[in-house]
Image (tube, rainbow, N blue to C red):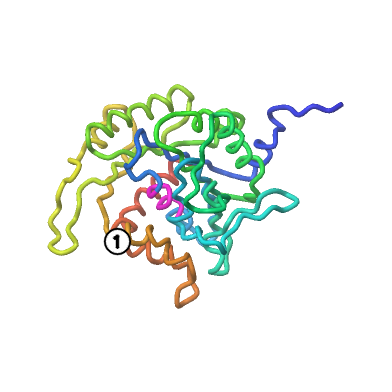
Amino acid sequence: MTTTTVEDSPVTRRMQSIKHIIVVLAGKGGVGKSSVATQLALSLYNSSPNARVGVLDIDLTGPSIPRMFGVDGPEFAVHQSTSGWVPVYADGEAGEQRLAVMSVGLLLKKKGDSVVWRGPKKNGMIRQFLSDVRWGELDYLVIDTPPGTSDEHLSLMEHLAEVQAKMSAVIVTTPQAVALMDGMKCVSFTRAVGLRVLGLIENMSGYVCPCCGEVSNVFSSGGGEEMARREGLVFLGRLPLDTGLVDVLDCGGKGAAVDELGGFRLLAQYLQTPTGRLFREISAQVVTGAT
């Protein structure tokens, strides 16, 4: 009788073809964690004409990644193959398959269906995502997590224990005091489990009026940068509230279809937003830190 060691587990074998795993964390909901994960994936995709990126959404009870990538329609479905689940490719209609997306939102019969699962069921779903999805060769796997530090985070770290050397994290917060307090819990979590932190992003840092250009600090400003300095973390940058970005991600690039020149519409629209231009520097720091 043969036995399967941890080093030879299905998850470990699947992760061997992935170079870097980046976990996006936030201490509380509503700070824009999923939008940052989406922007990070798009920016990494755009960093090289050959970059291959995967996005895994383990926010099981509130999956928003399919909507943001424009793959939440009935024509986008996860298929089963002899080598595992085939993810949805957000750039597939542009003639490429370099941006793979997997989420429980792609498995629901109706988009409005709720996911009412206890811890063991969540753990099993995450294990299946990590072991059964046919990611192929990836330069980056971006993992969008639920807010806080709960069952999903512990399951993720447990299943990826043997490949933790290629894992790192990005923490997202807003400048307001409540978000910063919860963000500190993420910092504490990464230290408890030995997860390397690439840096911290201060999201929703100011709002630029599209009419007059006046900047209003809706949630204050500078708190994230101060927390990063105090905790010895790299401050990756500030991102303002951007109505253009909201429009793009709410529509998912209008179905993630090709544009007039045959390109990836969602990416083209995103790069034209003020936030898209700002995120290039953040993405460059993440690439440097991850590699």
User: Could you tell me what secondary structure mostly forms the magenta stretch?
Assistant: helix
Position of 21 with respect to 28 (left or right) is right
Q: In the rendered view, would you say 259 is above or below 282?
A: below
Q: Quadrant of the N terminus?
A: top right
- For mark 1, what is the residue? 244
Q: Position of residue 277 (x, y in %)?
A: 32, 58
> Would residue 141 be counted in the magenta stretch?
no
Position of 239 with respect to 70 (left or right) is left
Q: Residue at x 38, y 48 (%)?
A: 36
Q: In the rendered view, would you say 30 is above or below 266?
A: above
Q: Residue at x 40, y 52 (%)?
A: 39
Q: Position of residue 211 (x, y in %)?
A: 15, 64
Instruction: Classify residue 181 by image quadrant.
Output: top left
> Would residue 40 be counted in the magenta stretch?
yes
For the residue marked with disc 1, what is the amino acid? Gly
Give the magenta part as a residue range.
35-42
Classed neighbour count for the residue bearing mark 1: other residues with Cα under 10 Å, few (<14), some (14–19), many (≥20):
some
Q: Nearer the viewer, residue 1 or 120?
A: 120
Q: Position of residue 8 (x, y in %)?
A: 72, 32
* Furthest residue in direction bottom, as rendered: 260
Q: In the rendered view, would you say 61 is above or below 134?
A: above
Q: Position of residue 41 (x, y in %)?
A: 46, 52
Q: Residue at x 32, y 42 (%)?
A: 31
Q: Nearer the viewer, residue 230 or 252?
A: 252
Position of 134 with respect to 254 (left or right) is right
* Furthest residue in direction right, as rendered: 1
Instruction: Classify residue 220 by image quadrant.
Output: top left
Q: Secondary structure at mark 1?
A: helix
